Amino acid sequence: MSGIDSNAVEAYLRDLQARICDTLGAIDGSAFAIDDWHKPADSPLQGSGRTRVLADGAVIERGGVAFSDVSGSRLPPSASQNRPELAGRSFRAMGVSLVIHPRNPHVPTSHANVRFFVAEKPGEDPVWWFGGGFDLTPYYGYDEDARHWHATARDACAPFGAEVHPRLKRWCDEYFFLKHRDEPRGIGGLFFDDWAAGGFDASFALMRSVGDHYLSAFVPIVERRKDTPYGARERDWQLYRRGRYVEFNLVWDRGTLFGLQSGGRTESILMSMPPLAAWRYDYQPEPGSPEAALLERYLQVRDWV
């Protein structure tokens, strides 16, 4: 595996998890609990991880930040069906994935993920790539927040060429889309997968930049909105829109499917679920309301910067 430093990737991911938990825990006033886990010896998937969860906090109703490093002798169908070159290869997959569900409906839900994958076969070169991104799912729209989020995403991509940010933004808009609802999950951000452009060092640098910019993108929004007054109406709308988040993760998210099909740790895979969500039959918000504005202005593909 000349030129590929998996240990450096692992060290970065572990440090990123710690930095994110320390920063968000300080804002909330509560620490993320630590759950270290190891796959049993007889499991088809080997490896370990650290899942960190904060529940019932002052600012974060539920937040999970998970690191995992797993390997196996055979890929699940969801990963190999469109990549025939992966057939017969063992694999190693590691990453940090997080979802933060704030308590205040004026604070958006945020998601981020950075990951590395390598598949090997004796006598052949390894197949590897990086992936990741971050995206924002508001319940109430604010232009200031949307501009800041996307400007930070642009800054994360800037060192890698002018074409990278438009490509990763478009990729995000297309991926985080509920096809059965014909609507975006949120206002987007960045997404990339199967990324090996420029070789290992350049691709690793892009992954690090995306991971390092997550807090810069999210923390100012949390600080601005966490003390905004709200009542039962806003809470009901938040729970209703969280239902869309659940639908996407269980129906469309490739990471969830890969984890479950490969024998991953279910508790860690499903930590992205909100603690509470609601569904209402054919609900339509009142015309001219802030809730209607979310659908009409913010849940639309647009250039915020």
Image (cartoon, helix red, strand yellow):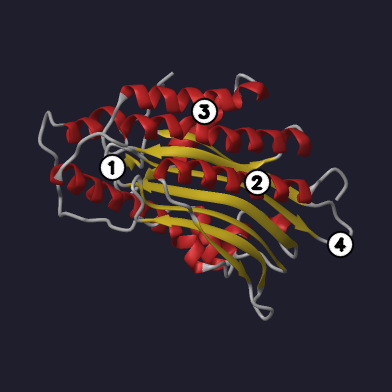
> Mark 4 or 2 closer to N-term?
2
* Figure quadrant of residue 174: top left
Circles 2 and 3, Cβ within 8 Å, touching? The answer is: no
Q: How many C-alpha atoms fall within 10 Å of the one at disc 1: few (<14), some, or many (≥20)?
A: many
Q: Disc 2 or disc 3, which is closer to the eye?
A: 2
Q: How many C-alpha atoms fall within 10 Å of the one at disc 3: few (<14), some, or many (≥20)?
A: many
Q: Position of residue 86 (x, y in %)?
A: 71, 58
Residue 166, compared with residue 118, is above or below; it is above
Q: Position of residue 13 (x, y in %)?
A: 65, 47
> Mark 1 or 3 closer to N-term?
1
Q: Secondary structure at mark 1?
A: loop
* Figure quadrant of residue 194: top right
User: Could you say which disc has been placed on residue 153 in the image?
Assistant: 3
Question: Which amino acid type corresponds to the residue marked 2 in the rendered image?
Answer: Asp
Residue 229, compared with residue 152, is above or below; it is below
Question: Which amino acid type corresponds to the residue marked 3 in the rendered image?
Answer: Ala
User: Which residue bears the numbered disc 4?
Assistant: 122
